[in-house]
Image (cartoon, grey):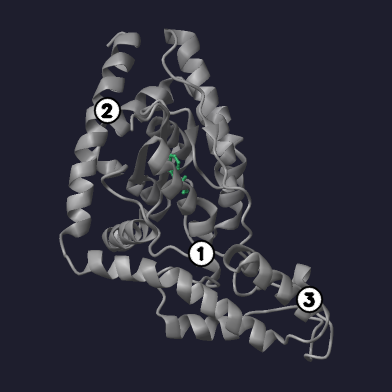
Protein backbone atom coordinates (compact mmCIF):
# COMPACT_ATOMS: atom_id res chain seq x y z
CA UNK A 1 0.00 0.00 0.00
CA UNK A 2 1.36 3.42 -0.80
CA UNK A 3 0.83 5.70 2.14
CA UNK A 4 0.08 9.27 1.27
CA UNK A 5 0.02 10.85 4.69
CA UNK A 6 3.12 11.19 6.80
CA UNK A 7 3.37 11.39 10.56
CA UNK A 8 6.10 11.61 13.19
CA UNK A 9 6.24 11.38 16.95
CA UNK A 10 8.69 10.75 19.76
CA UNK A 11 8.95 9.94 23.44
CA UNK A 12 11.64 10.76 25.94
CA UNK A 13 13.30 7.57 27.17
CA UNK A 14 12.03 7.57 30.73
CA UNK A 15 12.15 3.78 31.07
CA UNK A 16 9.39 1.18 30.98
CA UNK A 17 6.01 2.41 29.76
CA UNK A 18 2.76 2.15 31.71
CA UNK A 19 -0.90 1.76 30.75
CA UNK A 20 -1.29 5.54 30.52
CA UNK A 21 1.39 5.69 27.82
CA UNK A 22 -0.21 2.80 25.98
CA UNK A 23 -3.82 3.98 25.95
CA UNK A 24 -2.89 7.66 25.69
CA UNK A 25 -0.42 7.54 22.79
CA UNK A 26 1.17 4.23 21.87
CA UNK A 27 -2.05 2.55 20.77
CA UNK A 28 -2.54 5.42 18.35
CA UNK A 29 0.98 4.94 16.98
CA UNK A 30 0.39 1.24 16.41
CA UNK A 31 -2.74 1.98 14.41
CA UNK A 32 -1.12 4.76 12.38
CA UNK A 33 1.73 2.60 11.15
CA UNK A 34 -0.77 0.76 8.93
CA UNK A 35 -2.20 3.80 7.22
CA UNK A 36 0.57 6.38 7.19
CA UNK A 37 4.24 6.69 6.50
CA UNK A 38 5.25 6.85 10.14
CA UNK A 39 8.45 7.90 11.92
CA UNK A 40 8.72 7.15 15.65
CA UNK A 41 11.80 8.07 17.58
CA UNK A 42 13.49 7.98 20.96
CA UNK A 43 13.97 11.60 22.03
CA UNK A 44 17.22 11.02 23.90
CA UNK A 45 18.48 14.58 23.48
CA UNK A 46 15.23 15.77 25.02
CA UNK A 47 15.89 13.51 28.01
CA UNK A 48 19.16 15.36 28.55
CA UNK A 49 17.45 18.78 28.68
CA UNK A 50 16.38 17.90 32.23
CA UNK A 51 18.54 14.89 33.16
CA UNK A 52 21.87 16.30 32.04
CA UNK A 53 23.41 15.96 35.49
CA UNK A 54 22.89 12.20 35.64
CA UNK A 55 22.60 10.51 32.24
CA UNK A 56 23.53 7.10 33.63
CA UNK A 57 20.15 5.54 32.90
CA UNK A 58 19.60 6.83 29.37
CA UNK A 59 20.90 3.72 27.57
CA UNK A 60 18.93 1.29 29.67
CA UNK A 61 15.81 3.44 29.39
CA UNK A 62 16.09 3.50 25.60
CA UNK A 63 16.24 -0.27 25.48
CA UNK A 64 13.28 -0.67 27.84
CA UNK A 65 11.20 1.80 25.88
CA UNK A 66 11.90 0.34 22.45
CA UNK A 67 11.12 -3.13 23.80
CA UNK A 68 7.78 -1.80 25.02
CA UNK A 69 7.11 -0.24 21.62
CA UNK A 70 7.62 -3.48 19.73
CA UNK A 71 5.79 -5.41 22.45
CA UNK A 72 2.82 -3.10 21.95
CA UNK A 73 2.86 -3.85 18.24
CA UNK A 74 5.06 -1.28 16.52
CA UNK A 75 6.54 -3.19 13.62
CA UNK A 76 9.92 -2.04 12.25
CA UNK A 77 8.78 -3.32 8.85
CA UNK A 78 5.78 -1.02 8.89
CA UNK A 79 7.21 2.14 10.43
CA UNK A 80 10.57 3.77 10.99
CA UNK A 81 11.84 3.44 14.57
CA UNK A 82 14.92 5.52 15.26
CA UNK A 83 17.02 7.39 17.77
CA UNK A 84 17.08 11.18 17.64
CA UNK A 85 20.76 11.56 18.56
CA UNK A 86 21.74 9.31 15.64
CA UNK A 87 20.20 11.63 13.09
CA UNK A 88 22.37 14.70 13.60
CA UNK A 89 20.34 16.69 11.09
CA UNK A 90 17.84 17.23 13.93
CA UNK A 91 20.51 19.28 15.72
CA UNK A 92 21.28 21.31 12.61
CA UNK A 93 17.62 22.08 11.98
CA UNK A 94 17.14 22.96 15.64
CA UNK A 95 20.03 25.43 15.45
CA UNK A 96 18.66 27.02 12.29
CA UNK A 97 15.14 27.27 13.72
CA UNK A 98 16.54 28.88 16.87
CA UNK A 99 17.62 31.81 14.68
CA UNK A 100 14.01 32.69 13.94
CA UNK A 101 12.44 31.80 17.30
CA UNK A 102 11.92 34.74 19.67
CA UNK A 103 13.06 33.94 23.21
CA UNK A 104 9.78 35.43 24.45
CA UNK A 105 7.87 32.58 22.74
CA UNK A 106 9.91 30.07 24.70
CA UNK A 107 9.61 31.88 28.01
CA UNK A 108 5.86 32.15 27.82
CA UNK A 109 5.36 28.45 26.97
CA UNK A 110 3.03 27.16 29.72
CA UNK A 111 4.77 23.78 29.95
CA UNK A 112 8.09 25.54 30.50
CA UNK A 113 6.75 27.79 33.23
CA UNK A 114 4.92 24.95 34.95
CA UNK A 115 7.89 22.58 35.01
CA UNK A 116 10.25 25.32 36.13
CA UNK A 117 7.98 25.80 39.14
CA UNK A 118 7.06 22.21 39.90
CA UNK A 119 10.33 20.37 39.45
CA UNK A 120 12.51 21.30 42.35
CA UNK A 121 14.91 18.35 42.34
CA UNK A 122 16.71 19.52 39.18
CA UNK A 123 17.99 22.88 38.04
CA UNK A 124 16.07 23.66 34.85
CA UNK A 125 17.71 27.03 34.24
CA UNK A 126 19.80 25.61 31.38
CA UNK A 127 19.50 26.90 27.82
CA UNK A 128 18.77 23.37 26.54
CA UNK A 129 15.60 23.18 28.60
CA UNK A 130 14.41 26.58 27.43
CA UNK A 131 15.04 25.49 23.84
CA UNK A 132 13.23 22.16 24.26
CA UNK A 133 10.37 23.22 21.96
CA UNK A 134 12.78 24.38 19.23
CA UNK A 135 14.38 20.96 19.13
CA UNK A 136 10.93 19.42 19.14
CA UNK A 137 9.88 21.66 16.23
CA UNK A 138 12.97 20.44 14.36
CA UNK A 139 12.10 16.79 15.10
CA UNK A 140 8.66 17.32 13.68
CA UNK A 141 9.20 19.68 10.76
CA UNK A 142 12.10 17.55 9.49
CA UNK A 143 9.53 14.99 8.28
CA UNK A 144 7.00 17.58 7.02
CA UNK A 145 4.08 15.63 8.51
CA UNK A 146 0.41 16.54 8.35
CA UNK A 147 -0.11 15.52 11.98
CA UNK A 148 1.63 14.40 15.14
CA UNK A 149 0.13 11.76 17.48
CA UNK A 150 0.81 13.06 21.00
CA UNK A 151 -0.83 13.31 24.39
CA UNK A 152 -2.66 16.44 25.47
CA UNK A 153 0.29 17.60 27.54
CA UNK A 154 2.22 18.25 24.31
CA UNK A 155 -0.28 20.69 22.80
CA UNK A 156 1.58 23.90 23.76
CA UNK A 157 4.73 22.51 22.14
CA UNK A 158 2.85 21.70 18.99
CA UNK A 159 1.41 25.19 18.87
CA UNK A 160 4.95 26.56 18.97
CA UNK A 161 5.96 24.17 16.20
CA UNK A 162 3.25 25.63 14.00
CA UNK A 163 4.31 29.18 14.85
CA UNK A 164 7.91 28.40 14.00
CA UNK A 165 6.87 26.76 10.71
CA UNK A 166 4.79 29.79 9.80
CA UNK A 167 7.66 32.14 10.55
CA UNK A 168 10.09 30.05 8.49
CA UNK A 169 7.70 29.99 5.54
CA UNK A 170 7.18 33.73 5.87
CA UNK A 171 10.90 34.54 5.78
CA UNK A 172 12.15 32.01 3.27
CA UNK A 173 9.16 30.76 1.26
CA UNK A 174 6.82 27.84 1.81
CA UNK A 175 8.46 24.61 2.92
CA UNK A 176 6.84 23.36 6.09
CA UNK A 177 3.22 22.32 6.62
CA UNK A 178 1.70 23.36 9.95
CA UNK A 179 1.14 19.99 11.61
CA UNK A 180 -1.90 19.25 13.73
CA UNK A 181 -2.05 17.25 16.94
CA UNK A 182 -3.65 13.82 16.56
CA UNK A 183 -5.03 13.10 20.02
CA UNK A 184 -6.21 9.65 21.05
CA UNK A 185 -9.92 9.89 21.89
CA UNK A 186 -9.58 10.49 25.62
CA UNK A 187 -8.96 7.18 27.35
CA UNK A 188 -8.86 7.91 31.04
CA UNK A 189 -6.16 5.94 32.84
CA UNK A 190 -6.03 6.91 36.49
CA UNK A 191 -3.04 5.83 38.54
CA UNK A 192 -3.36 3.39 41.43
CA UNK A 193 -3.96 6.29 43.81
CA UNK A 194 -6.40 8.15 41.56
CA UNK A 195 -3.97 10.81 40.36
CA UNK A 196 -2.80 10.82 36.74
CA UNK A 197 -0.72 7.71 36.11
CA UNK A 198 2.87 8.84 36.17
CA UNK A 199 6.23 7.32 36.76
CA UNK A 200 7.16 10.13 39.11
CA UNK A 201 4.07 9.51 41.29
CA UNK A 202 4.98 5.85 41.59
CA UNK A 203 1.35 4.92 40.89
CA UNK A 204 1.67 3.07 37.60
CA UNK A 205 0.90 -0.32 36.15
CA UNK A 206 3.69 -1.01 33.68
CA UNK A 207 3.31 -3.02 30.48
CA UNK A 208 6.23 -5.17 31.59
CA UNK A 209 5.16 -5.66 35.22
CA UNK A 210 5.08 -9.35 36.24
CA UNK A 211 1.49 -10.53 36.70
CA UNK A 212 2.11 -11.22 40.41
CA UNK A 213 3.05 -7.55 40.95
CA UNK A 214 0.04 -6.42 38.98
CA UNK A 215 -2.34 -8.44 41.06
CA UNK A 216 -0.88 -6.89 44.19
CA UNK A 217 -1.09 -3.40 42.73
CA UNK A 218 -4.73 -3.90 41.80
CA UNK A 219 -5.54 -5.18 45.27
CA UNK A 220 -4.33 -1.87 46.68
CA UNK A 221 -6.18 0.34 44.20
CA UNK A 222 -8.66 2.92 45.47
CA UNK A 223 -12.27 2.36 44.48
CA UNK A 224 -15.29 4.43 45.50
CA UNK A 225 -14.11 5.88 48.84
CA UNK A 226 -17.69 6.08 50.13
CA UNK A 227 -18.27 2.37 49.61
CA UNK A 228 -17.11 0.57 52.72
CA UNK A 229 -19.07 -2.67 52.44
CA UNK A 230 -20.41 -4.71 49.57
CA UNK A 231 -23.91 -3.88 50.79
CA UNK A 232 -23.30 -0.14 50.16
CA UNK A 233 -24.26 0.89 46.63
CA UNK A 234 -21.15 2.02 44.73
CA UNK A 235 -20.65 4.86 42.28
CA UNK A 236 -18.62 3.85 39.19
CA UNK A 237 -18.10 7.45 38.12
CA UNK A 238 -15.87 8.18 41.13
CA UNK A 239 -14.11 4.78 41.10
CA UNK A 240 -10.53 4.50 39.79
CA UNK A 241 -11.14 1.04 38.55
CA UNK A 242 -14.18 1.63 36.40
CA UNK A 243 -12.40 3.58 33.63
CA UNK A 244 -10.37 0.41 33.06
CA UNK A 245 -13.51 -1.61 32.60
CA UNK A 246 -14.48 0.91 29.95
CA UNK A 247 -11.20 0.19 28.16
CA UNK A 248 -10.75 -3.53 28.72
CA UNK A 249 -14.12 -5.17 29.38
CA UNK A 250 -16.77 -6.08 26.85
CA UNK A 251 -19.85 -3.88 26.73
CA UNK A 252 -21.99 -6.62 28.30
CA UNK A 253 -19.48 -7.22 31.09
CA UNK A 254 -19.20 -3.51 31.75
CA UNK A 255 -22.96 -3.15 32.10
CA UNK A 256 -23.10 -6.10 34.49
CA UNK A 257 -20.37 -4.48 36.55
CA UNK A 258 -22.12 -1.15 36.59
CA UNK A 259 -25.38 -2.71 37.73
CA UNK A 260 -23.71 -4.97 40.25
CA UNK A 261 -21.83 -2.02 41.73
CA UNK A 262 -24.67 0.48 41.90
CA UNK A 263 -27.06 -2.28 43.03
CA UNK A 264 -24.72 -3.40 45.84
CA UNK A 265 -24.40 -6.98 44.55
CA UNK A 266 -20.89 -6.94 43.16
CA UNK A 267 -18.19 -6.11 45.70
CA UNK A 268 -14.94 -4.31 44.94
CA UNK A 269 -12.87 -7.45 45.48
CA UNK A 270 -14.78 -9.36 42.80
CA UNK A 271 -14.78 -6.35 40.52
CA UNK A 272 -10.99 -6.22 40.84
CA UNK A 273 -10.80 -9.90 39.92
CA UNK A 274 -12.57 -9.15 36.64
CA UNK A 275 -10.16 -6.29 35.99
CA UNK A 276 -7.18 -8.52 36.70
CA UNK A 277 -8.46 -11.23 34.36
CA UNK A 278 -9.00 -8.75 31.51
CA UNK A 279 -5.73 -6.98 32.08
CA UNK A 280 -3.87 -10.28 32.03
CA UNK A 281 -5.53 -11.25 28.77
CA UNK A 282 -4.53 -7.91 27.29
CA UNK A 283 -0.94 -7.93 28.56
CA UNK A 284 -0.03 -11.59 27.95
CA UNK A 285 0.60 -11.28 24.19
CA UNK A 286 2.51 -8.02 24.72
CA UNK A 287 4.73 -9.61 27.32
CA UNK A 288 5.33 -12.63 25.12
CA UNK A 289 6.42 -10.39 22.24
CA UNK A 290 8.58 -8.38 24.58
CA UNK A 291 10.31 -11.50 25.86
CA UNK A 292 11.02 -12.77 22.37
CA UNK A 293 12.71 -9.48 21.40
CA UNK A 294 14.53 -9.23 24.72
CA UNK A 295 15.93 -12.72 24.25
CA UNK A 296 17.91 -11.51 21.25
CA UNK A 297 20.49 -9.11 22.71
CA UNK A 298 21.02 -7.20 19.46
CA UNK A 299 17.31 -6.88 18.57
CA UNK A 300 16.87 -3.30 19.75
CA UNK A 301 20.21 -2.14 18.33
CA UNK A 302 19.35 -3.70 14.97
CA UNK A 303 15.94 -2.06 14.85
CA UNK A 304 17.44 1.33 15.63
CA UNK A 305 20.35 0.99 13.20
CA UNK A 306 18.01 0.26 10.31
CA UNK A 307 15.58 2.99 11.37
CA UNK A 308 18.31 5.60 11.83
CA UNK A 309 19.38 5.12 8.22
CA UNK A 310 15.87 5.47 6.87
CA UNK A 311 15.17 8.58 8.95
CA UNK A 312 18.49 10.13 7.96
CA UNK A 313 17.77 9.60 4.28
CA UNK A 314 14.56 11.59 4.66
CA UNK A 315 16.19 14.23 6.88
CA UNK A 316 18.94 14.88 4.33
CA UNK A 317 16.35 15.83 1.75
CA UNK A 318 14.64 18.29 4.07
CA UNK A 319 17.97 19.77 5.10
CA UNK A 320 19.11 20.47 1.57
CA UNK A 321 15.87 22.41 0.98
CA UNK A 322 16.30 24.25 4.29
CA UNK A 323 19.91 25.22 3.60
CA UNK A 324 19.02 26.39 0.14
CA UNK A 325 16.19 28.57 1.43
CA UNK A 326 18.30 30.04 4.25
CA UNK A 327 21.08 31.00 1.86
CA UNK A 328 23.62 28.43 3.05
N1 LIG B 1 8.10 16.14 24.24
C1 LIG B 1 7.77 14.77 23.98
C2 LIG B 1 7.51 14.05 25.32
O1 LIG B 1 7.77 14.57 26.35
C3 LIG B 1 8.86 14.05 23.25
C4 LIG B 1 9.13 14.61 21.90
C5 LIG B 1 10.29 15.16 21.50
C6 LIG B 1 8.26 14.63 20.78
N2 LIG B 1 10.22 15.53 20.18
C7 LIG B 1 8.98 15.21 19.74
C8 LIG B 1 6.94 14.21 20.57
C9 LIG B 1 8.41 15.39 18.46
C10 LIG B 1 6.37 14.39 19.33
C11 LIG B 1 7.11 14.97 18.28
O2 LIG B 1 7.07 12.93 25.32
Looking at the image, tell me whether mark 1 or mark 2 is earlier in sequence order: 1
Q: Single out the mark in the foreground, 1 or 3.
A: 3
Residue at 50% over, 23% down: 164
Q: Is residue 271 left or right of residue 130?
A: right
Mark 2 and mark 1 in contact (Cβ < 8 Å)? no
Instruction: Estimate the spatial distance between the alpha carbons at disc 1 and disc 2, rounded to whole Å.
Output: 32 Å
SS of the residue at dot 3?
Answer: helix
Most foreground residue, 129 or 65: 65
Residue contact at pointers 1 and 3, CB within 8 angstroms: no
230, above or below 8, in the image: below
Residue at image mark 2: 314
Name the quarter where the C terminus is drawn: top left
Q: Which badge, 2 or 3, is on the more N-terminal residue?
A: 3
Residue 323 in the image: state x and y as whole percent: 29, 15
Sequence-wise, which precedes: disc 1 or disc 3?
A: 1
Q: Position of residue 253 (x, y in %)?
A: 66, 72
Return the mark for residue 19: 1
Q: CA distance from mark 1 to mark 3?
A: 26 Å
Which dot, 2 or 3, sits closer to the camera?
A: 3
Q: Which residue is mark 3?
A: 259
Q: Marks 2/3: CA distance?
A: 54 Å
Identify the secondary structure beneath mark 1.
Answer: helix
Amino acid sequence: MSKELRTVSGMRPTGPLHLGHYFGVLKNWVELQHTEEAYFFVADWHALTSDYADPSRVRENIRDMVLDWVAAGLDPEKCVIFRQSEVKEHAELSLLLSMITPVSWLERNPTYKEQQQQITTKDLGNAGFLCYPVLMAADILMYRPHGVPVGEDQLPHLELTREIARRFNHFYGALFPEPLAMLTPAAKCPGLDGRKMSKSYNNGIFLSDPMADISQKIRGMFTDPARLRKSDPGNPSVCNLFPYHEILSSIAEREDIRQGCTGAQLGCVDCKKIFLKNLEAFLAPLQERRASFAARPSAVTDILLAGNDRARAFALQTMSAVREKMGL
